[in-house]
Image (cartoon, helix red, strand yellow):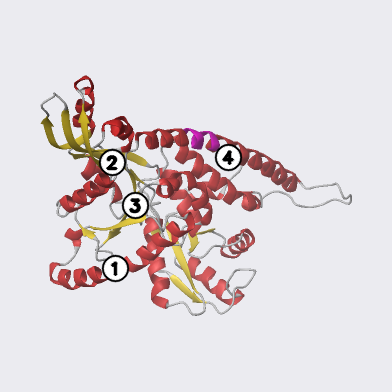
Amino acid sequence: MIETAEDSRKKVERALLVGIREPGEDEADVFEHLDELADLVRNLDIVPLEPVVVNLHQAMPQYYVGTGKAEEIATLAQECEADCLIFDTPLSPSQQRNWERLAKCCVIDREEVILDIFAERARTREAVLQVELARAQYSLPRLTRAWTHLSRQHGGGATTRGEGEAQIETDRRLLRRRIQQLRDELETVRRQRDTQRKARRRNAVPHGAIVGYTNVGKSSILRALSGAEVLVKDQLFATLDPTTRRIDLGNNLELLLTDTVGFVRKLPHSLVEAFKSTLEEAVLADFLLLVLDISSPQLEAEWETTLSVLRELGADEKNIQIVFNKLDLIDREAELVLLARLNGLFPEAIYLSTETGEGLDKLREKLTSIAAERHQLLRVVLPPQRYDLAALAHANGRVYEEAYTENGELELVFTIGPVHRHKFLEYQR
């Protein structure tokens, strides 16, 4: 059985975080990223120790940092009894191996931390498959880390191989086969999701996606609007699977809202790729609710991160409604100044608190306006034998005027969606 880095991390309790300050990078940004990494690490029940920041002039191939600095960090990790070194910067497989030999402890990077959190949070078949695929692709070039205890000695012949080398090649072949199986299974799941999407498009109900940084309250908004049970937790990446709920807005108006996986700074590209089918909900939606945590000290950075992911998905040009959540958490004395600044940047934004309910009525009004845009105003005159269409208008539209003529015809003024609109065209006036 392979003793993987994942198995060894089950014993990890304390981790020394290492941040890299690249040339021209602001020191405050580095510490903000480290604070977020510390939050991610806590989600794995690991205690983050006081972080170390390295001012880097040039990336080095062996340890990413210079040899002297690497030895200094390794010594510090031993002195503070850290079980693990966690880098906020991606490390290559060879750099991870070099670090583990030097520090004699588990060494991982931000991407592996996020992968572990995703693995813990995945619930549905699609999410489990997506996470397993991302982890398999991440692990493939790192398999040698699991086999350093085996012999690598070569004999005299060119075809003679050590036990470790043979086992590594076997594992690579098995892992590549598993990666292909996962891709095939995901393709099947994606076809099923496409079928569901086509059914939604046939119903012509407006469809929106809730997007934003992780833990800004997207699921809370969906639950508050729909009244349905939706998982809500104060933790990073609580929602990995898209959850769609029908929102009844009254007056025969409705729409669908989908809660999507949260974004995070330095979100690994492999995860963006693995969760493409989930994130496609944002691409295919008619409009987006972009949710921001108004109480977050990194509000602007989270806004930029969300926009950058939407750009990568090709969804940044959609109709986007900005929603600031957690209004109840900001200091009321500073509220006027903050709102004045945000109103200047986002004049159409909606401010609310799912905790107190403040502002939810304004969001519902906006959603009602969006849904109403899909309903065309019609004036029709129905003969007596087509009074069934009047019942259809009442059931699926909004009737404004209704009157009978002298010859028994029925005049209607109403709005109705595109699904039923064609049935009234021959009676339109």
Q: Nearer the viewer, mark 4 or mark 1?
A: 4
Q: Which residue is mark 1?
A: 297
Structural distance between the alpha carbons of marks 4 and 3: 28 Å
Which residues are drawn in magenta? 187-192
In front here: 289 or 54? Answer: 289
Q: Which residue is mark 4?
A: 183
Q: Quadrant of the N terminus?
A: top right
Q: Earlier in the sequence, mark 2 or mark 3?
A: 2
Residue 25 part of the magenta-drawn span: no
Residue that lies at the very extreme toward the top in this rendered image: 385
Residue type, numbered disc 1? Pro
At a point 49% along the width and 66% down the height, the residue shown is 77
Residue type, numbered disc 4? Arg
Q: Earlier in the sequence, mark 1 or mark 3?
A: 3
Q: Earlier in the sequence, mark 4 or mark 1?
A: 4
Residue 349: percent from the left, percent from the top? 24, 61
Structural distance between the alpha carbons of marks 1 and 2: 33 Å
Q: Nearer the viewer, mark 1 or mark 3?
A: 3
Residue 412: percent from the left, percent from the top? 17, 34
Q: Earlier in the sequence, mark 2 or mark 4?
A: 4
Q: What secondary structure is found at the residue carrying circle 2?
A: strand
